[in-house]
Image (cartoon, helix red, strand yellow):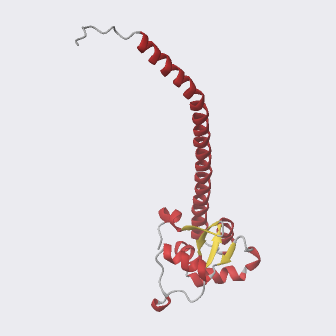
Amino acid sequence: MNSLANVQNLIYEIRGYNVMLDSDLADLYEVSTKRLNEAVKRNSLRFPAHYMFQLTKDEYENLRSQIATSSKAHGGRRYMPYVFTEQGVAMLSSVLNSERAIQINIQIIDTFVRIRQLALSTNDLSKRVTELEKYFIEHSKDYSEDMKEIHQALDLLMERTKPAKVGFKTK
């Protein structure tokens, strides 16, 4: 069984959605994947396409390359898995009517929220760094002319205040 501490590691981005695999959710709820999907199918009106969708073969192969999943030869999946968006996970608590499902859902939804907050704060931080870079570049251009003038003035001052040569010339 997957640890709730690792829920964030069970969330993948597919088709622009943060999603969880049906098998990972079944693991967390301590039910079989078959039972989870049966409950969803009995309540299919609660799961529109933006709540739950079935992966394509390419999506599944890409996902399998990122995570360790069993192959068909070793008792693995015989059909493409379903994935659930944050809204789909929330809806699962209404079809899996157990105390564990409710508690797990709360923790999973909290994880989705933390991921969204992290993404927003990362975007905000990125914007602020970009603004600082622009400000620095803009103002360093202004100062580069000033710095040139200061260097020229210092060179002129150094030239004018050079000590006189001491010594004598020989033929």
Q: Position of residue 154 (x, y in %)?
A: 46, 17
Asked if residue 71 lies left or right of residue 59, the reply is left
Q: Relative to 170, does residue 97 appear above or below in the rendering? A: below
- Is residue 46 in view? yes
Asked if residue 48 lies left or right of residue 137, the reply is right
Which residue is outermost to the front?
171
- Is residue 30 in view? no
Asked if residue 44 lies left or right of residue 34, the reply is right
Which residue is outermost to the left?
170
Q: Quadrant of residue 92?
A: bottom right
Could you tell me which residue is drawn at 61 percent across and 66 percent down? Answer: 102
Q: Quadrant of residue 137?
A: top right
Which residue is outermost to the bottom?
73
Q: How many marks?
A: 0
Could you tell me which residue is drawn at 61 percent across and 34 percent down? Answer: 138
Q: Position of residue 4 (x, y in %)?
A: 50, 65
Q: Quadrant of residue 104?
A: bottom right
> From the image, which quarter does the C terminus lie in?
top left
Could you tell me which residue is drawn at 65 percent across and 84 percent down? Answer: 38
Q: Position of residue 153 (x, y in %)?
A: 49, 16
Q: Position of residue 65 (x, y in %)?
A: 49, 76
Residue closer to the observer: 98 or 55: 55
Q: Relative to 77, does residue 23 appear above or below in the rendering? A: above
Residue closer to the observer: 28 or 76: 76
Residue closer to the observer: 13 or 32: 13
Q: Relative to 146, does residue 56 appear above or below in the rendering? A: below
Could you tell me which residue is drawn at 30 percent across and 9 percent down? Answer: 165
